[in-house]
Amino acid sequence: MVYKFRTGFRMTGDPQKVGETLESLRVRSGGQLTPEDVVVEAAKRRSVLHRYFEWDDAEAARQYRLSQARYLIRAVVVCPAQDEPPFEPVRAFVCVGGLDEEQPKSFTHVCQAMRDEQLRDQVLERAREELLTWRKRYADLKAFAEVFTAIDKLVSCDL
């Protein structure tokens, strides 16, 4: 079997060795690959997987807290107040920026993003890219053929 890193993933190293190591772990674990098994294997300094992890505990803790912060930001939704017209809850903060190194990713309130043409375009483009990524991930599932057709039609339109 040939292993490669998926497009869009910023990985270096030999994907063939990584894939073979992960498959070996899966087989040794009775057919199921778990993140815990991967970390145990990667902790071995000579493991092919070792280089893909942050082993400095302070830096790993910082990165994990940043991940928790992103999760928290994505968890908050805006709901209508009692004196407002009803609407479905929507994410309060949306990701903007990150299109180049001069403008790092950050979050802004969804209302602010929708009022600003440039930010709105960024949010819609990010949504479009996520939709295409989802479509590519499940492209081989024929049960979603109608959904794929709708996605193709939507993304071909000018947002």
Image: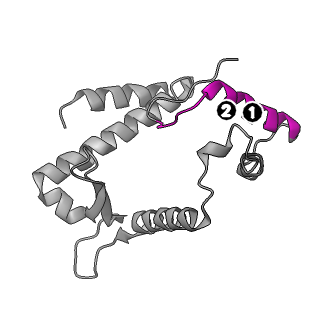
Front residue (pair 144, 74): 74
Bounds of the magenta segment: 9-28
Q: Which residue is mark 1?
A: 21
| Color style of the picture | one colour
- Left or right of 19: which side holds 60? left
Distance, label 2 to label 1, CA atoms, is 5 Å
Residue at (72%, 51%) from the top-left corner?
39
Horizontal side of residue 134 vs 48, given as left or right: left
State whether residue 42 is above or below residue 139. Answer: below
Say which amino acid is labelled 1. Answer: Thr
Hey, which residue is sitting farthest bottom in the picture?
A: 82
Residue 18's mark? 2
Locate the N terminus by quadrant: top right
- Please identify the quadrant where the C terminus is shown: top left
Q: Residue at x 55, y 23 (%)?
A: 140
- Name the residue at 55% across, 29% down: 5
Residue 108 drawn in magenta: no
